[in-house]
Image (cartoon, rainbow, N blue to C red):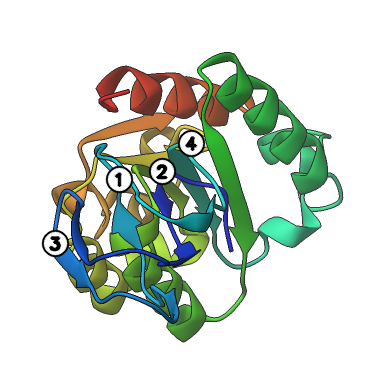
Amino acid sequence: MSEGWRVIVEFRIDGSGFLWRTKDAVVRQRAGGLIALNRTAMVTGGLIFGVGYKILSDRQSIWVLNGPNLNLLGEREPGIYGGESLADIETRCRESAEKSNLGLEFRQSNHEGELVAWIQEARTAAAGLAINAGAYTHTSVAVHDALRLLDIPIVEVHLSNIFAREEFRHKSFISAAATGVVCGFGPMSYVLAIDALAARVDL
């Protein structure tokens, strides 16, 4: 499970039943038995009467999703995209997130459907999302529609200034669903996106 504020809780109840409150649900537990909450829940506080209580993670998490061909950064057109690899950029993002006490989930896929599935997953697992959809930025209604489902801050990210390049890159299906856009600063675009999301996340 990705590190994040939404957590899975597992505990054993040895006394009478009680109410355990979360932000989005109230779970009533019966006396006795091992009970596992097999979905994510946003913890806001409360008191657990029992033993074996465990929170797997208690930090909010920023997700960074990367689209096609970004796995070849450092090799692909370095005059446009720079010489850093995607792994180098991930390291920058982790350092930036850590400064704000945020967890980080960093992923890349060359497949549109996989990106859509990850965006859907982020609905309940992320506190904020940065996305560089690569070429899908300019073509994918599916990615656009998935992003519209989210109620968390979203930053569209590009290494290059897409508005200073070919005309077909000026159209973005991401922008209309995003909170903001960062482009043209190379790998620093990602860091700026993380910083912007950290400022929007309610810690």
The structure residue drawn at horizontal position 83% and vertical position 34%, both measured from the top left corner, is 83
Frontmost residue, 126 versus 175: 126
Frontmost residue, 38 versus 17: 17
Quadrant for the C terminus, please: top left
Give the residue type at disc 4.
Arg
Query: How far apart are labels 1 and 3 at the CA level?
Result: 10 Å
Query: How far apart are labels 2 and 4 at the CA level?
Result: 4 Å
Q: Dot 1: few (<14), some (14–19), or many (≥20) neighbours within 10 Å?
A: some
Residue 74 screen position, x and y as percent: 84, 44
Residue on which disc 3 sits: 25
Q: Dot 4: few (<14), some (14–19), or many (≥20) neighbours within 10 Å?
A: some
Tell whether 84 sits left or right of 4: right
Quadrant for the N terminus, please: bottom right
**SS for tag 1?**
loop
Using the image, tell me which numbered label, if any, was put on residue 59. Answer: 4
Using the image, tell me which numbered label, if any, was put on residue 103. Answer: none
Please tell me in which quadrant of the rendered image residue 125 appears.
Answer: bottom left
Does 144 appear above or below 59?
below
